[in-house]
Amino acid sequence: MRFINRHPGLGGRWLLALLPLVLLLLAYGVGSAMRLADNPDDKLLPGATQMLDAIAQLAFSEDPRTGEVLLWSDTAASLTRLLLGIAISALVGLCLGIAAGVFPLLGASLSPFLAVLSMVPPLAILPILFIVFGLDELSKVMLIVIGITPVLARDLEQRSREIPPELFVKAQTLGANSWTLVLRVVLPQLLSRLLLSLRLMLGAAWLFLISAEAISATAGLGYRIFLVRRYMAMDVILPYVAWITLLAWAMDWGLRWLNRRCFPWSEGGVK
């Protein structure tokens, strides 16, 4: 049997999925052990014991200055900003995508505008957002919105244009108006695509969030990472990076589950 035609079973799929992570942890463990053997005070590659002590302090002990458990307060602050930004982006992107992809008069104006807007580097306008919206929560949420909404809208616009014209003709023959076409024909086709697009944009949303928190914040996962970097506290930074990765994976899994639950007919999604 050719290699291209070989498929792993359920157990093999789990083993192959875990293999890169195991190899990465093994390489880190060997590198950390070698550096700590030469210098027990080395901070670049802390050992498991050092990171577990840092996690215990951050996740289960109250901060003497604020009285909060830092890991959970940082997580709550970051997730609030992220989820709000994603929710606004999904709603605005869906509306713009439908308007540009379904209505030719609106698309003639919106489509070029979205194309140009999607090329603007969001991090380049971060100082402008801080000037316009201030240094509080709004500027961080707006960076996420501006960063991912144009891409979402363009993707949904393209998906709108791929809907067979016959569906519109048949619906109008049965007496459907423009509003009915959007609700009964277009929207069911786009919601599954919206969930897929959000999955693909999660990494960018986290990037914009961490960048904003690193510059101006008093709480948040990105804020904490950039706060302790001056002390080379890798025993804090690495667990925080791992925690962010776990949160992003959980969100991706949740969107995938929601897509399968609500739209079992959808095909071609990211595995």
Image: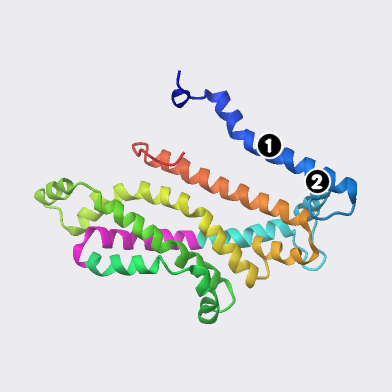
Left or right of 173, for residue 40? right
> Pointer 1: what residue?
23
Q: Which mark is residue 183?
A: none
Label 1 vs 2, first from the N-terminus: 1
Tell me if I can see residue 81 in this picture: no
Q: Which mark is residue 32?
A: 2
Q: Quadrant of residue 151?
A: bottom left
Decide whether the magenta segment is chiefly helix, strand or loop. helix
| Residue 213 in the image: above or below residue 176 | below
Category of crowding for the residue at label 2, using alpha-carbon neighbours closer than 10 angstroms: few (below 14), some (14–19), many (at least 20): some
Q: Residue furthest top?
A: 1
> Residue 183 location, x and y as percent?
26, 53
**Element at badge 2?**
helix
Left or right of 39, for residue 129? left
Residue at 46% of width from left, 38% of height from top?
271
> Residue 141 location, x and y as percent?
52, 67
Q: Residue furthest front?
A: 2
Q: Are marks 1 and 2 in contact (CB under 8 Å)?
A: no
Q: How many marks?
A: 2
Residue at 44% of width from left, 41% of height from top?
270
Residue type, label 1:
Leu
Residue at 70% of width from left, 61% of height from top?
225
**Element at badge 1?**
helix
Range of residues picked out in magenta: 85-105
Q: Quadrant of residue 179?
A: bottom left
> Residue 105 location, x and y as percent?
19, 67
| Residue 181 in the image: above or below residue 264 | below
Residue type, label 2:
Ser
